[in-house]
Image (cartoon, coloured by chain):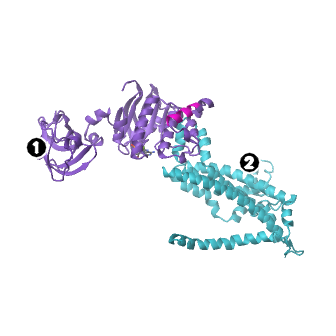
Chain colours: A purple, B cyan
Amino acid sequence: MNNENTLLSIQNISKHFNDSKAVDGLSLDIYENEFFALLGSSGSGKTTLLRMLAGLETPTEGQILLDDKDMVPVHASKRPVNLMFQSYALFPHMSVEQNIAYGLEMERMERSLIDKKVQEMLEIIQLEKMAKRRPDQLSGGQRQRVALARALVKKPRLLLLDEPLGALDKKLRSEMQLELKRLQHEVGITFVIVTHDQEEALVMADRIAIMRDGNLLQCGTPQEIYEHPKDRFAADFIGEMNFLPGVVQGDSIIASSKRKISVMSTNGFEDGESVVAAIRPERMSLFLENAENSIEGKVHTSAYHGMDILLHVSTEFGEKPISVRVPIHSVGDKPFKAGDSVTLYWYEKDTRVFANK
Amino acid sequence: MNFKNKMSSVLIAPAFLWLIALMVVPCVMILVLGFFQRGIYGGIEYNFTLENFQLVFDSLYAGIFLSSARIAGTATIIAVFIGYFAAYAIATSPKKWQPTLLFFAVLPFWSNYLIRTYAWIVLLNREGLLVGFSKWLGIDGGIPSILYTESAVILGLVYNYLPFVILSCYAPLARMNPDFREASTDLGASNFTTFRRITLPLSVPGIAAGAVFVFVLSIGNFITPALLGGGRFQMIGNVIYAQFLTANDWPLGAALSMVLIGIMMILLMIQASAAQRSIGQKNKEQLDG
Ligand SMILES: Nc1ncnc2c1ncn2[C@@H]1O[C@H](COP(=O)(O)OP(=O)(O)OP(=O)(O)O)[C@@H](O)[C@H]1O
Ligand SMILES: [Mg+2]
């Protein structure tokens, strides 16, 4: 991030529906020109948070400061914030250009200026030829671009996107991920995007927040979140992770099979406490003979992934096989068969320790 | 022809025959009747003539057509206005209350048409509740009774056909994706602008269906003008009724009927094709959630 001016400051915000606490005492700062991703399982309160930022939902308590101004009393139609709906919500009785112009008409902008801005926007989303079409005459990807244009053309301080790529197939999705990132760069607007897809968040975002039960579990750069997850849940949520159960003894962990797992530190845990050692599949190797940790096992399954081979290896560490990513260049054409004996190596610096719960 | 086609023609046959026997055949008979002469003592002389149709466009009958259209049109406008806002109120009330509210809105519809109309006579006549109430309020001699005036007929028509309008306007309002309204607000529109530019245009198919319904049923209605109009003035339905049953001029009655049916058919066709277009649009929308 090049710019760390706080644009939006969410302070201790809550939203309670009758008996359920959709958002519960959440605080978060978002910086200017940031691409911020909200990640979390279903029902964790992501949509509710966005709707409060847009003004479509009134917080039960808490403050939302945008450019140091409290937004809570400001009506949704008066906030410099726009929301791109998950359903796109394009007006079906209006053409593409009418949809895009709608928000500008609400600002009582001059017609000639509106036409000019709509034209610019159509160029950016590359739909000049579709200007006169109705939303039902567009493909899913085109519709998504119109919805984005309709929100962007108002040049909001903050653009909220609720699972904008949810309805798209995988290929279009990764194209649109790059497109969104390019657009954000081009227009210089702060984006807050909600997604279910952790890979999407890692690829697109400057910072990621993981939500759970209406609050933040962890917030940080993709690298921080991926390399230093805060707890077992966060580690499991982002990317793939092997968990080896054991108990703390001094500076290491003793697995149930009495094998010792070396880790950097067991700070924060007491001797005899039940924990898991966590290692990413790509941090394990068949060849790092000098690594502190090793375990013998038998190949359970082997899956070819193009760039690498994903091995599931049965070991004494438990019922669940350990996942290992073996780079394709390191094994050549030699395939793995189920039952092959292998030894896995990993460094203690790549091993995280979490409470086992 | 495959099995599915055969199956559907078997299933559709009874309805089709029914339609032919009770709808198409009588209509054709009426149409044919319109081109014959009236017998001197009633009855029909089978000589071809265009006289009846000329008579229909004569100032007397054309005038009645026009005034019927005016009355039906007024009733339609009032019914659509009231009905749309009732439907809007129902569609925006809490979800769990909506079925109950709809039930009450269409409740009168389940009672007999004649009884409902007679009930209005009781309410509106010179000794009726309305005049009595105005006397009780202290108006000297009470307000004049509107029974047996055009206003009473319009009132009766609006009252009778309001449930249709409520139902046909409720459907698009209840189905409308609430995101549309929120998106409009988010883009900076006031609640009134959102209503004017989003909600209202998207409910036009329902409004059109309701309006055509009320107009078509009103313009041909003869019971309400007879009872609430007190026979003092006639709508086209009453004239047709009289030609067949009292004046015994079946050919003229037939010609009048044909013109009336023609007007109705044109309106229904316009409405159906408009609905068809918007249904096509809706289906596509729903595919993408
Ligand atoms: N209008 C509402 N009335 C009652 N409860 C609600 C309402 N809106 C949301 N909730 C509840 O609040 C919680 C959070 O919902 P929210 O839609 O914010 O989750 P989400 O993180 O967006 O989930 P998803 O990923 O499935 O979209 C859920 O338990 C939901 O049932
Ligand atoms: Mg959601």
Q: Residues within 10 Å of mark 1 (few under 14, many from 20)?
A: some
Quick check: can you spot residue A201? yes
Q: Is residue A255 left or right of residue A16?
A: left
Q: Which residues are magenta?
A: A116-125
Q: Residue furthest left?
A: A258
Main SS, magenta residues:
helix
Pointer 1 residue: A259
Q: Which of the pair A338/A28 is nearer the observer? A: A338
Pointer 2 residue: B137
Q: Is residue A198 above or below residue B83?
A: above
Q: Is residue A264 left or right of residue B100?
A: left
Residue B173 is situated, as x and y percent measured from the top left of the image, at 57, 50
Secondary structure under badge 2? loop
Q: Is residue B117 left or right of residue A151?
A: right
Residue A318 is situated, as x and y percent measured from the top left of the image, at 17, 49
Is mark 2 in CB contact (under 8 Å) with mark 1?
no
